[in-house]
Image (tube, coloured by chain):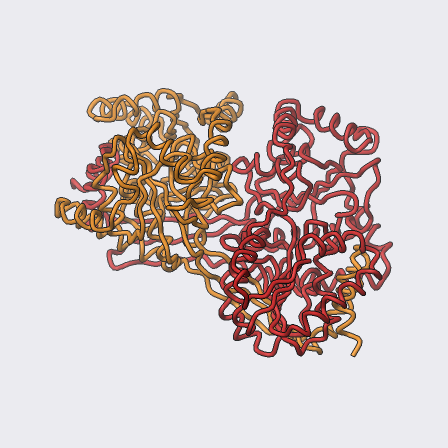
Chain colours: A red, B orange
C-alpha cells in the first residue's frame, strides 16, 4: 500500500504512476488460442471433446455434453432455503432493474414528409461463459443471464467447464433461477469457439458474455466480429472517497472486499482526514488477518492499495476521473453533490450505508463493469448488449424530390455514379 | 451473378453456400500492425513521423502535423455552392436524427427505499479515421463526426493520411461543417496507435471510429479495450426485395449502387416475378457499361451478385434474416407489413421511392452499419458509441437492512468474507 498526499509537490508524478500502473498480466496466449479456435472451427465436436479431455480431464461422450435443466432444478431444490431466498431476491431485483433498460423504438415524420426511425430487437441467441473452479460465482450467472432474458433473447446458452466432470451445484441453481435454456459442459477457448462458429452438437450464438481466464478473454477478443462480446475485463478495482466521520472499520472492509478478489485487484481511499487515513490503514491490517481470503487480500493491498490525502473531498474528483474506476464509493454526507462532478466511473455507491458489495449481489444494477480505466468509454453490461437497432427510412415521391437532388450531388462529388443514378432515375418522372 | 429459385429442391444447399461465402479477404497484417502499434506506443512522435515518411511519402515536420481549422473553413468557402448546400442539408438532417438518440438518465426509488439508476455521459475525446485516396468520402466524415458532436464529445479529432502531402478539400470542407476540433495529417495503423496511446504531439482519445483499410481495421481490433471502437467493418451489401411492379431500371440502379463500392460488395435481389428478374438482370448489364465505376461494379456483380426467385415476397424474409444484410430495400406496396417480419438488418428502406443511396447521404440515419451478417448482433453507429453509462445506488440504513442480509448470505456462499463483512458490519447497529 502506498500513502500519497495530494497537497505535496511530488504528488503529480506519483499519482500519474499510479494511474498508469498496469496490473493486467500480459499472458501471451494469443497463438495457442488461435490454434484452438481454428481447430474447433474446422473439426467441431471432435476438437471440443479432445480439448475437454486434455484440459478438464473427462470425456464428454461419457460424462455427457449437456447438463439437463432437470439437474439445475434439482440443484435449486437442494439449496439451503436461506440461500434460495437470497438468490430469489437478487434475481428479482436484477430483473426489475434491467427490464427498464429496454430501449424505446422511435419513429418520426419530418417536415419533408420523410418517415424515419429505429427499431430494437433482441439477438436470437446468446451465450454466457461461467468459469469453473474458484471463480464460479452464482452471482455472475445472474448478472449475465438475466439481462439477456430481459432483452428478450429466445435461446440463452450457458457454457461452463466441469473439471474432472464435477459440476458446481451453486452455478446450476443460479442457471435455474436465471432461466438459462441450455447448458454445455465445455469451457476454455474451445467453448468460446464452439459458441461462435457452432459445431454439430452446439448451435452457434450471436453474442457471448461472461468472465473467464486469459484464454477465454483472448478467444472472445479473437472472435469479436464473428459474434458480439462484452467488454474486455481486467482486474477489479474500487475507489472510496470518505470523510473522517466514517467508521474506519466499515471503510476498511470495503477496501478489502475488492482486495480479496485477486492479487491484481486495486483498492484506493481518498480522504481529507489524515487521522482517519491512519485509522483505516490500521483497520485493514487487523481485518485482513481474520479473512479466509487473507493471502489474496494481503497481496493485493500490499502491491496495489493506496491511501491518498486530499485537502477537501472535492479535490479527489478530478483524480477519480483519471482513474475512471470500476467502483466508486462516496462515503460522506454530500455524496449527491460530489456525484454530480464525477465523469468517469462504472458504478457509484452513494452515502455511508451503500457498501459496494451490496451492488455485487442484490441491489439490481449489473456487477459486470468496465475495469482498467475503461469507464472512460465503456459501460456496464446491460440489455443493450443483447439487442441491436435497425434504422429505417420511408420516402414518397415528394420526399425524394426534397432531399434527392442533394444526394445526387454528393454521390457525384464522391465519384459514385450508380449511387447518383439510383436517386436521379426516380426524380425523372 | 447467380440465379437461384427458392421453390426448387437444390435451393437450400445453394443458399446456405451464399450465406456462408466469405467475401472478406484474410489479409495477414496482424504481425505488421502489432509492430507498428508497439513502436508508436514506445517512440511516439518519431515513430509516427517515420511511418508517415515511409507510407505517405512526406515529412510531417515539413508539411505540418496538423491541418488548421482555418484551412477547413477555406475549403468550405471554396466549394461549389450547390455542393455546399447539399452538405449543409445532409449535416442538418444527420444531426437532427442523431440528437434524438441521446439516452435518458433514469432514477427510481423502490419499495425498500433504495435509490438506483443510470446516468449517461459523453466520452471526453473521440477520434474519427478518414481514409486517404479514393475512399475519402465527405459523407463518412459527417456520419462519424456528427454523432460524436450530438453525444456531446468535447474534443473531436480527425486523423487522415495525406499521401505526398496532398489534402482532400472535400474532406476538409466536411470536417468544417461537421465541427471537427482537431485534424492530424496521419493515417494507417500508426494513426490509430497514436490516438489510442497518445504521443507528445497528439493527445489520446477514448473512442476511435471510421472506415479504413485492412491495416487500420486490424489496428482498431488490436487496440479494442485500450479505447472503444466501432464495429469491425467488412464489405458492403444490399438486399432488395421487389415485386414485379417496380421499374427494373430503378432496381438495377440500386443493386449497382452497392456493387460499385468494391469488388467484394454484394447485391442480392429477391423477387416473386421471374420476368421481372430477367428484366433487372438485363438492366444491370446495360447500366454497368455506362458507369465510370464499371470495372468494380462488374467484378462485384459477377462474383457476388444474386437474383433469387421466391414464390411470394414474404417467403424471402426468413432468407433475408439469415443474410442479416447491412441494407435492405423493401420495394413493394406492403413494405410496412414485410418490415414487421424482419429480424436482422442494419437499415431498412421502405417503398419504391426509397433508394438506399438516399440513406447514404442525406436522409439522417447513419450509413455506418453492420456488414457481413453482423446485423444479427450489431447496430449502426450512433451517439451511444460516444457515450457511456454509470449506474448508481444509494441505500440508507433501512434499505440496507432489507437487502443486506441476502448479500451477506451470497457472499458467504461464494467464499468472499470481506464482501460479507462490508455489509454485515453496517447491519450490526
* Count of all numbered marks drawn on residues in the image: 0
Q: Residue at x 61, y 42 (%)?
A: A208
Residue A385 percent coordinates (x, y): 55, 50
Residue A171 percent coordinates (x, y): 77, 49
- Taking depth in this image into account, of B277 and B230 the one nearest to the observer is B230
Left or right relative to A124: residue A286: right
- The quarter of the rendered structure image containing the C terminus of chain A is top left
Left or right relative to B119: residue A50: right
Left or right relative to B414: residue A352: left
Left or right relative to B31: residue B178: left
When asked about the image quadrant of residue A61, the answer is: top right
Can the viewer see residue B289 in this picture? yes
**B259 shown above or below B345:** above
**A295 shown above or below B209:** below
When asked about the image quadrant of residue B349, the answer is: top left
- Taking depth in this image into account, of A284 and A355 the one nearest to the observer is A284
Residue A215 percent coordinates (x, y): 66, 36
Residue A76 percent coordinates (x, y): 81, 54
- Taking depth in this image into account, of A161 and A11 the one nearest to the observer is A11
When asked about the image quadrant of residue A363, the answer is: bottom right
- Taking depth in this image into account, of A237 and B343 the one nearest to the observer is A237
Q: Residue at x 38, y 48 (%)?
A: A392
- The quarter of the rendered structure image containing the N terminus of chain A is bottom right
Can the viewer see residue B317 in this picture? no
Amino acid at each position: 500500500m502506498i500513502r500519497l498526499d495530494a497537497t505535496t509537490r511530488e504528488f503529480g508524478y506519483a499519482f500519474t504512476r499510479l494511474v498508469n500502473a498496469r496490473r493486467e498480466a500480459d499472458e501471451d496466449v494469443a497463438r495457442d488460442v488461435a490454434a484452438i479456435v481454428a481447430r474447433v472451427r474446422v473439426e467441431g465436436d471432435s476438437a471440443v471433446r479432445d480439448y475437454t479431455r486434455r484440459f478438464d480431464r473427462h470425456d464428454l461422450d461419457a460424462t455427457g455434453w449437456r447438463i439437463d435443466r432437470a439437474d439445475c432444478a434439482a440443484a435449486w431444490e437442494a439449496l439451503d432455503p436461506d440461500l434460495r431466498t437470497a438468490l430469489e431476491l437478487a434475481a428479482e431485483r436484477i430483473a426489475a432493474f434491467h427490464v427498464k433498460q429496454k430501449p424505446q423504438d422511435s419513429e418520426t415524420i419530418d417536415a419533408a414528409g420523410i418517415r424515419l426511425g429505429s427499431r430494437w430487437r433482441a439477438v436470437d441467441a446468446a451465450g454466457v461463459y461461467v468459469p469453473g473452479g474458484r471463480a464460479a460465482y452464482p452471482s455472475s450467472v445472474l448478472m449475465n443471464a438475466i439481462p439477456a432474458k430481459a432483452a428478450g433473447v429466445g435461446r440463452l446458452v450457458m457454457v461452463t467447464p466441469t473439471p474432472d466432470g464435477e459440476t458446481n451445484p451453486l452455478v446450476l441453481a443460479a442457471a435455474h433461477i436465471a432461466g438459462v435454456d441450455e447448458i454445455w459442459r465445455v469451457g476454455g477457448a474451445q467453448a468460446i469457439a464452439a459458441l461462435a462458429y457452432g459445431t454439430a452438437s452446439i448451435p452457434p450464438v450471436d453474442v457471448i458474455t461472461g468472465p473467464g481466464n486469459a484464454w477465454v478473454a483472448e478467444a472472445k477478443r479473437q472472435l469479436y466480429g464473428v459474434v458480439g462480446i462484452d467488454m474486455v475485463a481486467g482486474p477489479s478495482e474500487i475507489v472510496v472517497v470518505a470523510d473522517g466521520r466514517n467508521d474506519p472499520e466499515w471503510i476498511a472492509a470495503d477496501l478489502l472486499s475488492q482486495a480479496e478478489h485477486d492479487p491484481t485487484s486495486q483498492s484506493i481511499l481518498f480522504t481529507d482526514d489524515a487521522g482517519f487515513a491512519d485509522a483505516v490503514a490500521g483497520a485493514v491490517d487487523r481485518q485482513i488477518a481474520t479473512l479466509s481470503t487473507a493471502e489474496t487480500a494481503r497481496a493485493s493491498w500490499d502491491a496495489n492499495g493506496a491511501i491518498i490525502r486530499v485537502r477537501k473531498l472535492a479535490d479527489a474528483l478530478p483524480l477519480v476521473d483519471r482513474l475512471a474506476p470500476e467502483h466508486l464509493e462516496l462515503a460522506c454526507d454530500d455524496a449527491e453533490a460530489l456525484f454530480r462532478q464525477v465523469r468517469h466511473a462504472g458504478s457509484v455507491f452513494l452515502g455511508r450505508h451503500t457498501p459496494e458489495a451490496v451492488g455485487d449481489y442484490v441491489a439490481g444494477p449489473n456487477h459486470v463493469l468496465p475495469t482498467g480505466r475503461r469507464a472512460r468509454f465503456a459501460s456496464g453490461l446491460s440489455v443493450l448488449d443483447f439487442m441491436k437497432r435497425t434504422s429505417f427510412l420511408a420516402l414518397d415521391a415528394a420526399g425524394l424530390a426534397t432531399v434527392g437532388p442533394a444526394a445526387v450531388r454528393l454521390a457525384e462529388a464522391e465519384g459514385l455514379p450508380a449511387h447518383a443514378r439510383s436517386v436521379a432515375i426516380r426524380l425523372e418522372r
